[in-house]
Image: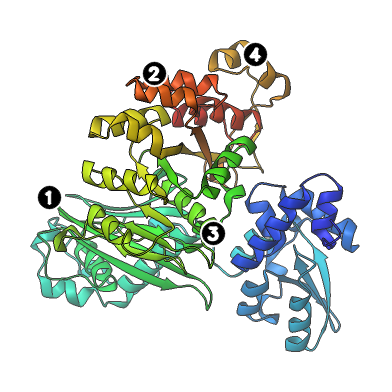
Amino acid sequence: MASLTGLPRKLVEKDYITTDLAEDLIAQAKQSRASFISTAINQGVVTAEEVAALASEEFGLPLLDLDAYDKELLPINSIKRSIIEKYKVLPLFTRGNRLFLAQSDPSEVAAIDEIKFATGMTVEAVLVTDDQLTFAIEQALNIESESLGDAFEGLDVELEDIDLEDSNPIANDDANDLKGADDAPIVRFVNKILLDAVRQGSSDIHFEPYEKRYRVRYRTDGLLREVSKPPVNLSGKIAARLKVMSQMDISERRVPQDGRIKMKLSKNKAIDFRVSTLPTLWGEKVVLRILDPSSAKLGIDALGYEEDQKKLFMDALASPQGMILVTGPTGSGKTVSLYTGLNILNVEGTNISTAEDPVEINLEGINQVNVSTRVGLDFAAALRSFLRQDPDVVMVGEIRDLETAQIAVKAAQTGHLVLSTLHTNSAAETLTRLANMGIPSFNIATSVSLIIAQRLARRLCPHCKVPAELPNSVLEQAGFTTTMLSSATVFKPVGCRYCVQGYKGRVGVYEVVKITDEISHLIMENGNAIEIAKAAQRAGFANLRTSALKKVAQGLISLEEANRVTME
């Protein structure tokens, strides 16, 4: 702990975190160019209030409740917007030649120096909680989302000139759509939708045309919700604008198309959108998947593994050969788990190649290949090529067929570490799925080293969650053990301005199973998924339901959310 100073040292002394975790958080903060405080809070290690109290004690600064402060009095123009966003600070008030500045990270002395130089004033820091500061900055800079249902209000689109009776967008002339794609109101509307989705932490945006209405939906924390209802006759122009941005053929509306959009938010941060169009009865539905590169660099501690599960994963990654399989439905976070493992393995002395469909996030130092069945480059062809390129680690986006599975198994048996995904519901079903695909049981037993089945559960908002008064009989029926009940506090969602319906962010729920001798024997004897699952539980590996209940007992998710993600 001798190397730790300031707030990290204080958190270790107060037993909030361990020395190893503090050093890991510092490294992650440097890598993502974020503050230590934001990194610790975002990973759920400590709350914003706990950090603020310790920072106040450590740095001797007054602690202000920013929620009680009148935001209209803020001298927002006294500091450039770029400085506010760069250092995450907010001017509170001036007194003579002194500027009082709200900060959540007092160790950021560079902010004070730059603002002193820029304003010529004496700057004094006032401590506020990180979440209150984030919300206040969004309000002050007018970043916080407006009512998207009225998104066209104030835009220079002449709605009275649009024939609202013509409810079939397909009948629109292509030339009109192409011209409309460059209309300033359409451009501003699409840009606003994309920016708002990024700021709300959404994973997907759906633009959907119907006979008499058009809607835009965000998928946030795994659930879709409607955010805007533009006039239906603008659907063709909105689709055209998105196709122009993603470099698609704007005149082709009869077949699906795929493309990408790159949005640069700052010098150091860019967001990619994977765009897909689909011809429907009433026009083209466009879906954008938001690909945030920072999600691939969260670090294993941010994903929600229990300590024993984390150790199993790290041990498997440290092995020179074998196969690690990550399973779960679409949207369960498999890609982030794989990328996290690849980032851990990504060192100078290791040759890593990946085959993906498509490559979602660019990883420096890793050879990534976009598979394309149209030119004959499928997963199997890419994998065969990898094995001629002296690989140490190979990642296959998904094992879909027998040929890919056979090559992956051979690679795992011949001194390579192989990472891949399968669409199954549990670890045990993954093993039987490989057997059903035609892989001999002895090859499965000798190649697969670890299976991770996972789901993503909505995390309870720390600001508004309240204890749920549930009798022990209900909790026991849900699956709580006596040990879990003795220390559990079950919370339920409420809803506040910081969250959506009582939830903010997501946390992983995992079933991590190492292939033990008993499980290997069952595989060799062609045991079914039920027998393998029981053997895994006897070996002490928690299944998805048990892992979800542990998250409930820790106050991270609600019992209803545990029931939803484990299908109880």
Furthest residue in direction top, as rendered: 473
Which is closer to the viewer, label 3 or label 2? 2
In this image, 124 relative to 213: left or right?
Answer: right
**Residue 563 position within the rendered picture, expressed as x and y whole percent measured from the top left:** 48, 26
Which is closer to the viewer, label 1 or label 2? 2
Label 4: which residue?
A: 472
Between 185 and 48, the one lying in front of the other is: 48
Instruction: Tell me which residue sits at (12%, 56%) in the image.
Output: 168
Earlier in the chain: of badge 4 and badge 2, it is 4
Earlier in the chain: of badge 4 and badge 1, it is 1
Query: Amino acid type of disc 3?
Result: Lys
In this image, 350 relative to 179: left or right?
Answer: right
Between 342 and 92, the one lying in front of the other is: 342
Earlier in the chain: of badge 3 and badge 2, it is 3
Which element carries disc 3, helix, strand or loop? helix
Q: How many labels does the image show?
A: 4
Label 3: which residue?
A: 297
Query: Amino acid type of disc 1?
Result: Leu
Residue 543 seen in render: yes
Which is closer to the viewer, label 4 or label 1? 4
Label 1: which residue?
A: 281
Query: Amino acid type of disc 2?
Result: Ile
Compute the Cα span from label 3 to label 4: 40 Å
Query: Amino acid type of disc 4?
Result: Asn
In this image, 557 relative to 67: left or right?
Answer: left
